[in-house]
Amino acid sequence: MSDDKFDVIVVGGGIAGTVASYLLAKEGLSVVLVERGNFCGSKNMTGGRLYAYSLEEVMPGFANEAPVERKVFKERISLLTMDQSVTLDVRSPKFAESGNDSYVVLRSSFDRWLGEKAESEGAMIVAGYRVDDLIVRDDKVCGIISNGEEMDADVVVLADGVNSLLAEKLGMKKPLRPEHVAVGVKEVIQLTRGEIDERFGLSGDEGCAWSFFGANTDGIQGGGFLYTNKDSISIGLTCNLQKLSEGSKPLMQLMNDFQSHPVVAPLVKGGNLIEYSAHLEPEAGAKMIPQLYGNGVLVIGDAAGLTLNLGHKVRGMDLAVISAQCAAQAILEAKSREDFTASSLRKYKDLLDVSSAIQNIEARDKYLEFMENPLLYNAYPLMIVDMLARLFVVKGGRAQTIFDDILKNIEALGKNQIENDFKAVKKL
């Protein structure tokens, strides 16, 4: 550890931390990034999809250099019962249009590359060190303490993930509540490139993103995901932690059942497990956003609760980039005034409030009550799959129309319940 004072110390080498370090170092500030793992990305895991628009603003044409796996050209959404499924398969050139593109990434290599980009601009990466505490003098954060050693800075940026104990120590963040987070588990399964292309109908560097709902979470709030890498697939589940604790199956049993489903089993057949990981994800929208700024300190990325789960689409990496941009701009302006008080660093929140990150999260809050409806994860998938399956069955007797089935299912579930759910949808 250095005895020198830095302009900025960033805690955490995920996407938010590395991008903030890159932007600040690029403007000539002295920046040190402290990462607990052996390198940036060594501990990071997500399903692995990056919506490119925000990072494209920071590093135009980044995908030509970055270790991206595949560009998403195909979207699939499946509703599952225990032994049946309905899948929507969408392939469109719109996915490849400028501003719409998204990439499958493996965070261990992608975040490491981002860290190297920050280093190339002059940031110092200190890996293998855990930040144990923050230095606070006269009610201002002035640095960090790691392994008993101190390091001073004008500003400390907390990018240490959803369970930011440092922000909690400062009183900026409340302890996590089980109902406000999801637990995600992911496996990376190695297959040949040819097997992936054949099983998912891909060619070249084309990628597929696939979401699953219904029996894969045993009827509790959550969903499944699958992304195609170059020579592996990332597959996993996310479940609300509170609902999971109240359920009848542990997460690993759900994962095993998911991979044994008739739709999923052929996709993973013969693959070799090369990575397993799990982590918590913020899921409560604006309720999860802590105090974002203080005297000498900012909170960004997952630590700031900036994840957007819409069921068919989970966003976190693009929002992490936006928060890093806003934080960097606020710090640069504070540096120009040599004023790192809370009133000066409030600029970060002002910028974030008008960004698409916060606007999308606030809009998503309208979905929260609807997404918590247990019918979405059991009764509705079963109704839809059964109804559509019967469209293609002929066994004599009077032909049943789809309208007959709809009426029967309305009666079975209860007309009032369905009417209330449709009213909730209309409010979104």
Image: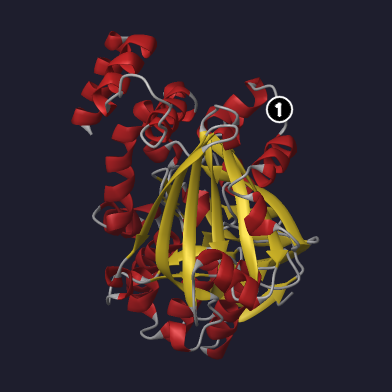
- Against 148, residue 290 (above or below) is above
Name the residue at 56% across, 56% down: 226
Is residue 401 or residue 373 the one in the foreground? 401
Q: What is the secondary structure assignment of the residue under circle 1? A: loop
Query: Residue shown at 36%/26% (left/top)?
Result: 369
**Image mark count:** 1
Question: Would you identify the image quadrant in which residue 253 lies?
Answer: top right
Mark 1: amino acid:
Lys
Circle 1 Cα neighbour tier, 10 Å, few/some/many (<14 / 14–19 / ≥20) = few
Above or below: residue 197 compared with residue 413: below
x and y percent of residue 16 in the render?
A: 49, 64
Q: Nearer the viewer, residue 340 or 365?
A: 365
Residue 143 percent across, percent down from the top left = 61, 62
Q: Please tell me which residue is depicted at 73% across the width and 31% down the height of the picture.
A: 250
Quarter the C terminus occupies: top left
Residue 269: quarter of image:
bottom right
Q: Nearer the viewer, residue 163 or 100?
A: 100
37 on left or right of 61 = right
Q: Quadrant of residue 291?
A: top left
Residue occupied by mark 1: 249
| Horizontal and vertical percent position of residue 265 | 66, 50
Q: Is residue 135 left or right of residue 53?
A: right
Residue 136 appears anywhere in the view: yes
What kind of colouring is applied to the model shown? secondary structure
> From where the camera sits, is residue 45 visible?
no
Left or right relative to 421: residue 386? right
Q: Residue at x 54, y 84 (%)?
A: 117
Above-or-below relation of 175 to 9: above
Rendered location of residue 327, percent (x, y): 40, 64
Name, please, the residue furthest toward the front.
Answer: 396
